[in-house]
Image: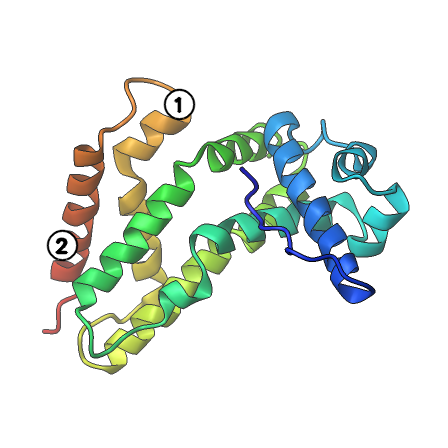
């Protein structure tokens, strides 16, 4: 299934350009996951998207830009900006749990695991690629959580002196053993019950640690 919906109607002018852009991005996401960054060429992306290579370059100036956009799109699909908009009248735990579940679904998706393995495998030879991945994915998500936490601190629902550190702690706790097992490909996949227990325990631990003094 495509990670990015294609517009329903091509139409004249701009809508058709956007349809081509969506097709290029969708093709890139599929190929980067299957073949890695080095194994994916702009020619292959153009062929899979059904456009010319010139069209690919007219939308994305180079492969690095396309890779960065593919990572950003994946994150935006599973963790949209609206997820981090704090509802100060609603229950904090419920909102944090929604963020936790979305994040866990993101990092344990087959696409994310494949891309992460590619980044690790090429970290020494392609540090720029690792930085592009960090900027487009993990950093954006962490900044989103920081924004959410800042609003909750301002409302007196949390007591956090270092928002950056707290956001990092939250996501690291969420990865835990279950993500490591998934990434290493060892053991049986976690059950829905195991995931629920892990997410709930992590959220409760975080809330106890940063409860108002």
User: Tag 2's secondary structure?
Assistant: helix
Between the C-alphas of marks 1 and 2, the distance is 27 Å
Q: Residue at x 55, y 44 (%)?
A: 3
Q: Residue at x 15, y 40 (%)?
A: 197
Name the image quarter holding residue 39.
top right
Looking at the image, residue 98 sits to the left or right of residue 50; the answer is: left
Q: Residue furthest bottom?
A: 155
Q: Position of residue 188 (x, y in %)?
A: 28, 19
Name the image quarter holding residue 190.
top left
Q: How is the image coloured?
A: rainbow
**Residue corresponding to mark 1:** 184
**Residue corresponding to mark 2:** 204
- Which of the marked residues, 1 or 2, is nearer the chain's N terminus? 1
Of the pair 49 and 61, the residue shown nearer to us: 49
How many tags in the picture? 2
In the picture shown, does residue 152 fall above or below 70?
Answer: below
Q: Residue at x 36, y 71 (%)?
A: 85
Q: Which mark is residue 172?
A: none
Q: Position of residue 177 (x, y in %)?
A: 27, 32
Residue 169 visible in the current orientation: no
Residue 41 visible in the current orientation: yes
Q: Residue furthest top?
A: 187
Of the pair 24 and 33, the residue shown nearer to us: 24
Of the pair 193 and 19, the residue shown nearer to us: 19
In the picture shown, does residue 36 fall above or below 129?
Answer: above
Q: Position of residue 155 (x, y in %)?
A: 22, 82
Q: Position of residue 87 (x, y in %)?
A: 27, 75
Q: In the picture, which quadrant includes the C terminus?
A: bottom left
In the picture shown, does residue 52 fall above or below 6?
Answer: above
């Amino acid at each position: 299934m495509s990670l990015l919906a294609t517009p329903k109607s091509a139409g004249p002018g701009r809508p058709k350009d956007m349809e081509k852009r969506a097709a290029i991005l969708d093709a890139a996401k599929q190929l980067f996951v299957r073949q890695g960054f080095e194994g994916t060429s702009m020619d292959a992306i153009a062929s899979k998207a059904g456009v010319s290579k010139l069209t690919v370059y007219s939308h994305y100036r180079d492969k690095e830009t396309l890779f960065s956009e593919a990572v950003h799109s994946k994150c935006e699909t599973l963790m949209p900006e609206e997820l981090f908009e704090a509802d100060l009248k609603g229950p904090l735990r419920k909102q944090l749990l929604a963020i936790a579940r979305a994040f866990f679904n993101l990092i344990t998706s087959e696409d994310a695991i494949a891309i992460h393995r590619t980044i690790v495998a090429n970290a020494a030879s392609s540090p720029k690629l690792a930085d592009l991945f960090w900027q487009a994915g993990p950093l954006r998500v962490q900044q989103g959580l920081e924004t959410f936490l800042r609003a909750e601190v301002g409302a007196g629902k949390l007591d956090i002196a270092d928002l950056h550190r707290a956001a990092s702690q939250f996501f690291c706790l969420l990865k835990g053993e279950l993500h490591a097992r998934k990434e290493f490909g060892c053991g049986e996949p976690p059950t829905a019950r195991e995931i629920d227990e892990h997410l709930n325990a992590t959220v409760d631990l975080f809330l106890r640690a940063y409860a108002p003094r």
